[in-house]
Image: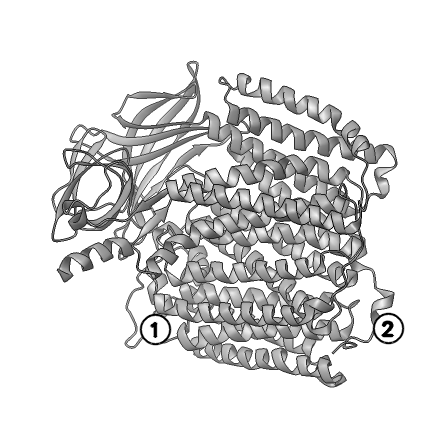
Amino acid sequence: MKPRHKRIALIVGGLASITIAAVLVLKALDSNIALYITPSDVIAGKAPHDKAFRMGGLVKQGSIQREGMTTRFIITDTAKEIPVAYTGILPDLFRDGKGAIVQGRLGADGLFSASEVLAKHDENYMPPEAQHAIDQAQKK
Amino acid sequence: MTPELGHFALILAFVTALMQGVLPLIGAQRRRTQWIALARPAAQTHFLLLAFSFACLAQSFLANDFSVAYVAQNSNTQLPAIYRFAAVWGGHEGSLLLWVLMLSGWGAAVSVTSRQLPEVMVARVLAVLGLVSIGMLAFILFTSNPFARLLPAAAEGRDLNPLLQDPGLVFHPPMLYMGYVGFAVAFAFAVAALISGRLDAAWARWSRPWTTAAWCFLTIGIAMGSWWAYYELGWGGWWFWDPVENASFMPWLAGTALIHSLAITEKRGAFKNWTVLLAIAAFSLSLLGTFLVRSGVLTSVHAFASDPSRGVFILILLGVVIGSSLTLFAWRAPRVSAGGAFALVSRETMLLINNVLLVVATGSVLLGTLYPLLIDALGLGKLSVGPPYFNTVFVPVMVPLLLLIAVGPLARWKHADLRDMARRLRLSFVLALLAGIILPQLMGRWTPMTALGCLLAVWIASSTVFQIVERLKIGGGNAPASFWGMHLAHFGIAVFVLGVTLVGGYQEEKDVRMQTGDVVSVGGYQLRLLGISAAPGPNYRASVGEFELSKNGRVLKTLHPEKRQYFSSQMPMTEAAIDAGLTRDIYVSLGEPLDQQGAWSVRVYFKPFVDWIWGGCLLMAAGGFLAVLDRRYRLRVKVAASVPASATA
């Protein structure tokens, strides 16, 4: 092969692999994003029913109930409230009245089944998405 | 008084950075020997001033000087002394000071150890490092002064975040920053070479040991962070694709590509432009990482309360660094010669594929990390990109890369003989196939993914060992350090891959409710809860669980996980108890008390071969350090001294 052909082969090979990678990447990205949806938007019916999403807000004061390893609580953006159920061990900073983010699916009965609960690692820190949900609710 | 001295030293350091960044650069251009000669002393003074400033801040912490706002926010009289020292980099201001101290340290190291380099080159490298330092110091002095006084002084400090009160804080950030910032040296060499127009094999040889050293520190830093998250955060995972983890992983990927492409540039004089671009990319990604962590734009484990407006400054700095270096590149690159030709099957091609794959991997991680920020910035809503994305994208890119690790080092430069390579890989191929079939079955269950992982690990490990054996047969005593370094690092990857595969495929995780006397079985082991009692700590109160670990009725060990409540912040903390072993970890952590009967929620993990993950990383880093020791990096380059540095300027 002439050097020029070799270079063309290299470039074509490189481009082909990058294209394949790009297609894979975009496909994976599309199916693995979780939207943040505020409790008010969930009530307004803007939440997907077939897909997991994230919801941020405050854990309503006094709403935490335990039944064995399952915990039920309410996430609120101060305007609207969504009941949530989670089975497993909660993060250390999951507290009454504090900000939290839950990821999971919304059931037909309006109960949000969380597969993951995130609370942050600083007593005074509010997850931006939880703050955002509250700001949105209070603007209305 | 001490804080003022520290602040003053910081200002002086800024002034020396100006001298270091500007004068040698002009001197090198106009051939003024005195100005060129200024670079080394300026870099060393710069380092000493910053070290002094850093020591002043540390002294303020150790002396509990709560009239310094930063100390008051991050320390407390009850905090043990070692954490009071480590708390220096426990917050925003101090970690930036550490960053710039590390930068000046690398600069000083270059100035001391680069006797064999031409003066003009050294002057330019140090000047570029000085320029970066100017940017960072301006950031510290104008927006994040760690010495700012608090009036009136606080009676007691707010305390260090309990999560950070761990030996991990003492080692993880300094190691990580050593690596991050170390890429500044690779960047400085690249820019200096662009300015001089002398982009050649000698430049690559000078740059290589520095780049490899930085890469080693970054490897250790990331591994330590991963280990810390494993035992301290109480999650038991070793990698979460958290944005901040990605922020440190992207420079690592780019850096890995860079150390390989530097090899081609040094040995064959090829891919010079590409290598320079990678050096710029690796450092830019380091800066991006600093921005992502310090600006608080991300929701992540590292997102402690922080000030987003500061992010703008780093973003501008990032823009200036990328913009100016790419402009310089665009101006200089067309003059760079192409380098030696090579056949389609050759070491060059192998390394090129390595580079393409690593760059694609970097790009996909970058996309996943920045995508939520981009969408948010465009006002299209908030979203998060989860670990499944990264796993689906990352694994297919890594598999060919791992396959090639065994093949690449066998290929000769310029033109490799496929048949010869196939012959030398035959035995590895058979062993890898056997491993893929047998190992997963020994572990209890055969799945395609575990088979693939075992196959890859044994493929890499065996071919590495066979190559060493081949070398020993023809007289391995004279093999250079870099030969051993490369194979050790590649072997480390095999160990890492095996660890990741086995822990991913065979771990067991249980969240259970336990009362005194209850038993939970995991991975063939039994854990009995003997009781949970209260115990005092230096600055916290703890509930300590007592678990008896046994296997087949034989008691092995008692484990003591803790739940701590820190006095100053009222923050609870989980301290997991881990029985670590070569082939498995047993991991227990306490959740919380559940009811009046004294039951607790308890998390129990069985983690087979998990320590191999970090062991593999340490082997990679050890291999890197071994390569840095190679004699040829310390040989004086005869030709270099005679070439006028600014020949093309």
Which sits in the foreground, B373 or A44? A44
Q: Are marks 1 and 2 in contact (CB under 8 Å)?
A: no
Depicted B285 relative to depicted B571: above or below: below
**Residue drawn at point x = 40 percent, y = 62 percent:** B91
* Callout 2 secondary element: helix
Given the image, on which type of amino acid does mark 2 rest? Ser
Would you identify the image quadrant in which residue B597 lies?
Answer: top left
Given the image, on which type of amino acid does mark 1 rest? Ser
Q: Position of residue B435 (x, y in %)?
A: 62, 22
On the question of residue B608 being in view, the answer is no
**Residue drawn at point x = 61 percent, y = 26 percent:** B455
Would you identify the image quadrant in which residue B30 lies?
Answer: bottom right
Residue under numbered circle 1: B67
Residue under numbered circle 2: B642
Q: Position of residue B221 (x, y in %)?
A: 54, 50
Q: Where is the C terminus of chain B found, in terms of image quarters?
A: bottom right
- The chain to which mark 1 is attached is B
Would you identify the image quadrant in which residue B491 lies?
Answer: top right
Q: Earlier in the sequence, mark 1 or mark 2?
A: 1
What color scheme is it?
one colour
**Residue drawn at point x = 59 percent, y = 68 percent:** B326
